[in-house]
Amino acid sequence: MQNDYPAGGNDQNGQPSKSREWNVKNHGSFSFRKIKQPRFVMLKRILILLFFIVFSAGVGVGLGVFLTYLGEIPLVSDLKAYKPSLSTKIFDGKGLMITELFSEKRTLVSLDDVPLHLQNAIIAIEDNKFYHHIGVDFIGVIRSSIVNLVKGEYSQGFSTITMQLPRNMFLTKKKTIERKIKEIILAFQIERTYTKREILEMYLNQIYLGSGAYGVEAASLKYFGKHVSNLTLPESALLAGLPRSPNAYNPYRNPEKAIQRRNLVLTQMNRLGFITLQEMVDAKMTALELSTGEDSEAPYFIEYVRRQLEEKYGFNAIYQSGLRVYTSLDLDLQRLAQKAMAEGIVEAEKIIVPNLPTIAGQAPETLQCALVLIEPASGEIKAMIGGRNFKESKFIRTVQAQRQPGSAFKPFIYTTAFANGFTQADIILDTPVVFKDETGEVWKPENFSNKFSGPTTLRTALTQSRNVVTVKLLDKVGVKNVIQQTKKFGIQSPLKPYLTLALGASEVNLMELVSAFGVFPNHGVRVEPVSILRVESNTGEVLEENTPYHQEVLDPAVAAIMTNLLENVVNHGTGYGVRRLGFKYPAGGKTGTTNDYSDAWFIGFTTEYVAGVWIGLDSHKSMGRGITGGRVACPIWTKLMLEIYADRAPKNFIYPESVELVKFCNVTGLLPNPGCKVVTGAFAIGTAPTQPCDVHTGAGAENPADIYNLNLSPDLVDFEGVTETAEPEETQELPRHPGTIPTVSPATDPDRPPMF
């Protein structure tokens, strides 16, 4: 009932108010006590009301923020399904890891494989209440907030390991209130979903520890060259100190700061009871010993493999999916190849660099190199060098540099000839000849020595790398036939259909040239070069497995004949440097020196390996007169073979039953008599000379054509007399005085490609 009167006191006439009357009526007694409400009670009510208003608003805002960010953050159930970027591991043929390809270098490990002292070190320095909080350390939040307010800047964080985990996996690294709210929300959810062990394991596999290493296993391999399970206490403490600032505490760049941080971790571990005082002291006294951190031992080979993988699987697969790639490379042979090249290129520079043209104020152009070692029976690439310095130039000269092979191309011309009925005892005149093209332009090929030797067996012509005889032979067998033959051998570079092909004027690359030479010791069978043997996914699924592609491209008898001839090149010809430098085992090979001494080659083989070496300048400029393949490339090949066969010998070359070894006169190409220069050569059964030599019996003959083995080369019919024999060209390819350039005086440079 509404009361229109005041609650107490008298009315205006001095009579008790109605409220008093009401009290008397209802209580049976009269009370003149006045009811009062103090001010502080009213203030308290107001404050309580304001508190509930603010609290409700805060809860509302908080709930709104929570709901807003809840829609933006990932589900914590995704943590275990989360697939971080995994590095692709590349192994050699023996299963030894060569290197890794990664955007984030990472290898996942179980917590059971992580030493307890590393787990404790991480907890001690990053989150010492990890096993006691529910995702957020509220005391730490208050402490950090006070410190930051006092300093007026964000100087101390309060992130727990649980909060760091989603930051490392999902969130931005930028310090913002928004990110911190998301971290807290996710931390609560993570703690409700996963055990502490699961959280710690995920954290240890995700944390960035500098130098491209994500996770403790990758960091352990990077900094100490060992698996995380083998880490010592001081090594674990050093890794534990890195997450705060991986760059600042990087032990390679800042070893002193890294040690200071490590010692701080050790102190904290001792304070928390994880290690004893003595363990702390001993660990702090331990010197910092890091892995060398060297780059891949075969950077050009790795780049060669990487490009193949990227073309087939794509960029993301290489750098994120954790492929396991097993290659053909043999790390032991690669190291021997690098050693031989390092020594040989220094020796070559001593005689080449002083002859290079220089511009005032500029250093001479860098001498470049390439090498590849292949197992001809399997096609596997066992070693590869693509240049002097991969960091300076990623151009893979082994496969990308197209260069003129010079005389190193000649064996393919002789191979085509032998496959078409010629024999090594056949005679071709080494005499001046002039060729004209369709426009009437004239070309006159010349020998290296500018001398001519008259009637010359093909054996001698190849052994001494006679240009004129080779050009005439090419003219007889046909340029197109030679090109077809070389394509079967795997040379895919376009070859110009001119007679200058005899002098190696068409450019090829080292890989295809070496692979083609492998047909000879492999009995006429070509095997496609292979670098990738098997590719597996990170779960072990085989994605690719390569088996060598074999194809017989040459009659085994012809392959044996060429092997015999190229062995003679090493024993008595332009490749004699192999013997002079001490390699005594069966080997065949061919030198190559090109236009104006701009390229120097040596391609050689044993029964097990075929290898090629190239030396030159990227600019294609001359390295100086007298710098031949025998002078600078052959020594590198020989150094490599001496290392490979340091404690064993290769097998002898085996000849098929379709081939016989026959002695003949190396002057006439006929069966020898007393006084003949007798040599032993390989012939297909039924093709060896049958007529005896009459020149060295004193009987003589009226027609010179009757005393030479002409076979398919009847160009002696009009020959009169014998041209003066030239000095063997092998002496031109070898250094006469170490450290100096041999004196030569050819009218033109050796193997100079003509105009057409």
Image: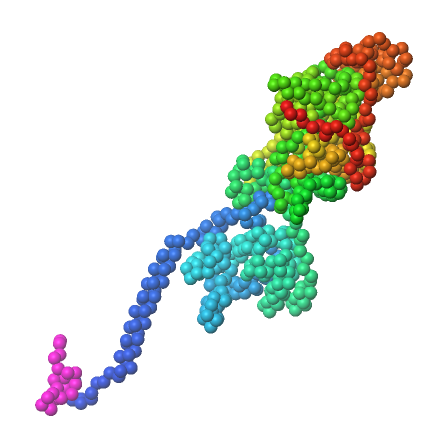
In the image: residue 298, left or right of residue 179: right
The quadrant in which residue 267 appears is: bottom right
Q: How far across and how far down the image is residue 331, in percent?
A: 69, 41
Question: Which sits in the foreground, 664 or 597?
Answer: 597
Q: Is residue 242 above or below residue 18?
A: above
Q: How far across and how far down the image is residue 645, in percent?
A: 78, 36
Q: Residue at x 76, y 17 (%)?
A: 428
Q: How far across and how far down the image is residue 739, in percent?
A: 79, 41
Residue 600 seen by the camera: yes
Outermost residue toward the bottom?
14
Residue 139 seen by the camera: no
Q: Decide whether residue 33 is among the magenta residues.
A: no
Q: Residue at x 45, y 53 (%)?
A: 76
The quadrant in which residue 518 appears is: top right
Q: Residue at x 41, y 59 (%)?
A: 178
Question: Which sits in the foreground, 695 or 595?
Answer: 595
**Image quarter in which the N terminus is found:** bottom left
* Image coloring type: rainbow
Q: Is residue 660 above or below residue 521?
A: above
Outermost residue toward the top?
702
Write the start and end of the magenta stretch as one range: 1-24
Q: How many marks?
A: 0
Q: How far across and how far down the image is residue 488, in percent?
A: 64, 23
Q: Decide whether residue 12 is among the magenta residues.
A: yes
Magenta span: predominant SS is loop
Q: Is residue 183 above or below residue 515?
A: below
**Image quarter in which the C terminus is found:** top right
In the image: residue 264, left or right of residue 637: left
Q: Residue at x 82, y 26 (%)?
A: 727
Question: Which sits in the foreground, 755 or 474?
Answer: 755
